[in-house]
Amino acid sequence: MDFLKRVLKMFTDDARMQKRGFFTTFFKTTEEDYTNAEFVEIDIERSGNKVAPVLKDHRTGGVIVDDDIFTEKRFKPPYSCLKQPVPIMDLMQRQPGERDDDATIGSWFARLVAKIKKALSKFHRMFKEQIELQCAQIMQTGIVQLSDENGNIVYDLDFKMKSSHKPTVSVAWSSSSATPLADLEALCDAINDDGKSDPAIAIFGRNAWNNALKNADFKDAVKKDGMNLGQLSPALKNRGGRYMGYVDIGSYRLELWVYNDSYESFKGSTLTKFMNADKVIVTAAVEDLDFRIVFGGVPTAGMKEPFASIVPAEVTYDGFARIHNRVWYDENGDTYTGESKMRALAIPVSIDKFGCLTTTL
């Protein structure tokens, strides 16, 4: 195996990249979702429930039906680019872990390659977190909002999630008179009516779960299904969510998950939960959802030698990410720069097959 293939394998074998985020698991990417275009075109589906009429006289021909079930949209995936300059002068200094007499291992070019690979791996993990954030935002609000390096929102895309799929309870779940089972059943009804699909999964924020368990009816209804852990949705196991059992509500059976993972903003050390602590997401089964992560074209000047034989210009992480790399040299500054780019956008094609309940007033 040549060096370039070994480096590519190093990226794709990274356990931190192989393990998708919990929300990202609900989304998929096929080969047709990787494009070189600036815009991607995709139909957002809304399931219809109209009954077909009959004809009084077959000679009158068919009834004209408006094409209002599919709405064709053109979306421009957000553009992200991360880079790290490495001045040659910095590479002349002994690096951590090297001995003073490490003349060969400590050569400046070997140090450069190590620094570039480390930087690109870090960038890839940051892109992975952005994808998880997009998926989390969509499943809770139907809106993607991404910020620049200063925290200003520069990308804002509303997929027009129905208001009936974003309800707020009439009695907060922290109250002794709360009705979590009835609140969840109402959201399940909306998903079943609009999405023509049985709700199957409920994802709780920490506070929503703790408050629900304080309700005697809900607590009694929860089945601690330890023997069948994740049997219905094994893809969700080991993704950061915790399986809590299942509950039968009316004609619905929901797997119960709690998700409590966090992310850190680009500038700052404050952690923010991917899942709002006071919300509950309800979705159809993963296999019944059409949630996509699509990729737009990335402008690049390409990779030049010697790095064209060392660093892969493109890395695809099976089913959810494609990232472009570049390394170039600035003669005036005697500086090499490693760079990674991505244009990913999460899209809820089956927009009516999920919903999110707010459990506070």
Image: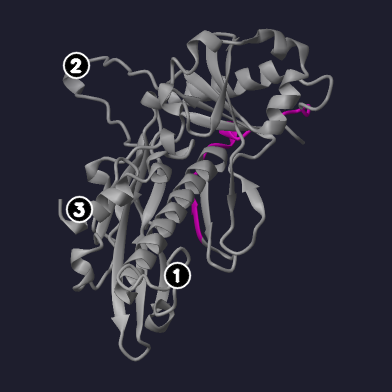
Q: Residue at x 33, y 17 (%)?
A: 53
Q: Nearer the viewer, mark 1 or mark 3?
A: 1
Viewer-proximal residue, 215 or 178? Answer: 215
Q: Amino acid at mark 2?
A: His
* Residue beneath disc 2: 58
Q: Residue at x 77, y 16 (%)?
A: 215
Q: Nearer the viewer, mark 2 or mark 3?
A: 3
Reply above or below: 56 against 335.
above
Question: Residue 265 vs residue 23: left or right?
Answer: right
Q: Amino acid at mark 1?
A: Gln
Question: Residue 317 vs residue 128: left or right?
Answer: left
Q: Helix or strand or loop: what does disc 1 sit on?
A: loop
Calculate the distance from the C-alpha at mark 1 to the C-alpha at mark 3. Answer: 26 Å
* Sequence-first tag of 2 and 3: 3
Calculate the distance from the C-alpha at mark 2 to the C-alpha at mark 3. Answer: 65 Å
Local crowd size for mark 2, using a 10 Å CA cut-off: few (<14), some (14–19), many (≥20):
few
Q: At which x and y percent is residue 138?
A: 50, 42
Residue extending farthest to the bottom is: 332
Q: At which x and y percent is residue 79?
A: 39, 62
Q: Amino acid at mark 3?
A: Lys
Q: Residue at x 46, y 24 (%)?
A: 284
Q: Are marks 2 and 1 in contact (CB under 8 Å)?
A: no
Q: Helix or strand or loop: what does disc 2 sit on?
A: helix
Q: Helix or strand or loop: what does disc 3 sit on?
A: helix
Reply above or below: 249 against 207.
above
* Sequence-first tag of 1 and 3: 3
Q: At which x and y percent is residue 242?
A: 57, 26
Q: At which x and y percent is residue 171?
A: 78, 26
Question: Residue 329 vs residue 156: left or right?
Answer: left
Give the residues drawn in magenta, as a range. Answer: 155-172
Local crowd size for mark 3, using a 10 Å CA cut-off: few (<14), some (14–19), many (≥20):
some
Which quarter of the rendered picture does the C terminus lie within?
A: top right
